[in-house]
Amino acid sequence: MDRQGHQGWCDPLRVPRLRCVPAPSPSSDPRGLALVLGSATAFGGMAVFAKEAYATGLGVLSLLEARFVCAALVFWLVVAVRHRRGTARFAPSRATVQAGLLLGAVGYAAQSGLYFGALTRIDASLVALLLYLHPVIVVLGALATGRETPGARTWAALGAASTGGILVLLGGGVGDLDGLGVTMAVGAALAYATYILCTDRAATDAEPFALSAFITTGAALSFGVAGLASGELDPGAMIGAAGWIVAIALVSTVGAVTLFLAGMARVGPSRASIVSTFEPVVTVGLAMAIYGEALTAVQLAGALLVLSAVVVLNLGPRRAPAQPARTEPDAPHEPTPAPVPVGATA
C-alpha cells in the first residue's frame, strides 16, 4: 500500500505486499467468487469453533499453541510438496526467515491472543465486528506514514466505519458491555493492523505458503514459551478438544488461506477483498443460530456501516495487470487506495 497504488497480494494470510506477484485481472469468474466465499465462511466459523473448544475446558494458550503447531506442520508439508513438484521454489533469504518468524512470534501472536481472549468474555458476534475495524486502522496508518494519499472516498469510508464502530458498541447498552473483553477485541484490531502495515514492508521475496509457514511457526514458538512459563499448557485438555482444534487449524486457517489464494487468482485482489466481507456475516449468523446472540437495530446499522466502509475502501478505478518483468507499479493518473486486507485470520 503506497502512493502509487497496489500491484499484488501474495501473502496467504491476506496481507497485501508490493512488488511481489502481479495482480490478476479483475474477473467475475463464478468459481473464483465461490472459492473466496468458501474462504470467508471458513474464517467466519473460527469464533464458534473457539467457543466450543473453550466449553470442553481448554484454555486460550493451549488452544492457540495447538492451533499454530498444527497449522505450521501443514503449511510446511505444502511447501515441501510444492517445492518437490517444482510449482514453487523454496529459497528464502535470511531476512525473510527472520521477518516471518518475528511477525508470527510478536504481531500475529499478539493479535490472536487478544482475539481469542476476547471470545472468552464477550459475544462472538461483537468480537467479529470489532475486529473488522482493522481495515480502517490500516488506512489510517497508511495515511499517517504517507503510504497512501487521502481522497474523498477514503474520508467517507473512515467516517462511516468510525460511526459504525460507535453504534456497534453503544447499541447494546454501555452497562452490558464487558470492558476488558471490548478492549481486547479492539486491541486485536489494532494489533492486526500493525501486523499488516509491518508485513507490507517485510519479506517481499517470500513464496506465499512459505511465509505462512514461518509466521505460524513463530506464533507457535511464542505461545509455547508463554504456555510453559505460565504452566497453562494442558495436553489432556488439548486431546479432549482435538476436534475443535483440528477445525480451527485446518478449516479456519490452512483451508481458508488456500481457498482465498485460489479464488483471488481468478477474481483479483480488490474483488476478493470485497467478497470477503461475508466473513463477519457468517460469524454473526452462526452466533445467532447456535448461542442465541442477537444484534440490536442500532448495532445492525453500525455493522452495515463498518462493512460498507470496507467495500468502499476497496472500490477504485481498475488498473491493467502489471507486467511480470517490472519491479515497480506504473503510477496511475490519480492516487487510488490499495485494496484493504480483510479477514479474521486471528
Image (cartoon, rainbow, N blue to C red):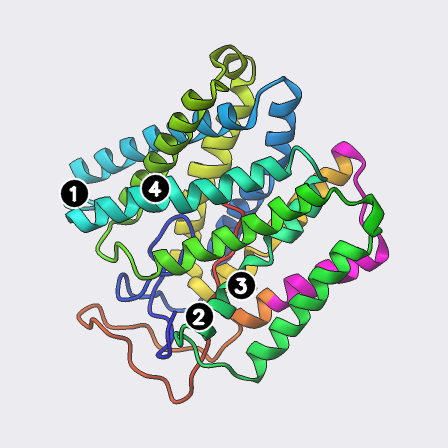
**N-terminal label among 2 and 1:** 1
What is the spatial separation of the Cα atoms under label 3 and label 2, in whole angstroms? 9 Å
Residue 299 colored magenta? yes
- Contact (Cβ within 8 Å) of mark 3 with mark 4: no
- Contact (Cβ within 8 Å) of mark 3 with mark 2: no
Q: Which residue is mark 2?
A: 142
Point 51% across, 10% down: residue: 236
**N-terminal label among 1 and 3:** 1
Name the amino acid type tagged 4.
Answer: Ile
What is the spatial separation of the Cα atoms under label 1 and label 3, in whole angstroms? 38 Å
The numbered disc on residue 215 is: 4
Q: Judging from the image, what secondary structure is the residue with disc 4 in? A: helix
What is the spatial separation of the Cα atoms under label 3 and label 4, in whole angstroms? 22 Å
Q: Which residue is mark 3?
A: 137
Q: Quarter-wise, where is residue 85 in the image?
A: top left
Residue 327 x %, y % = 20, 71
Q: Judging from the image, what secondary structure is the residue with disc 1 in? A: loop
Q: Visible in this render: residue 148?
A: yes
Point 36% across, 58% down: residue: 198
Name the amino acid type tagged 1.
Answer: Gly
> Which region is colored magenta?
290-309
Residue 125 colored magenta? no
Q: Judging from the image, what secondary structure is the residue with disc 2 in? A: helix
**N-terminal label among 3 and 2:** 3
Q: Which residue is mark 1?
A: 86
Name the amino acid type tagged 2.
Answer: Ala
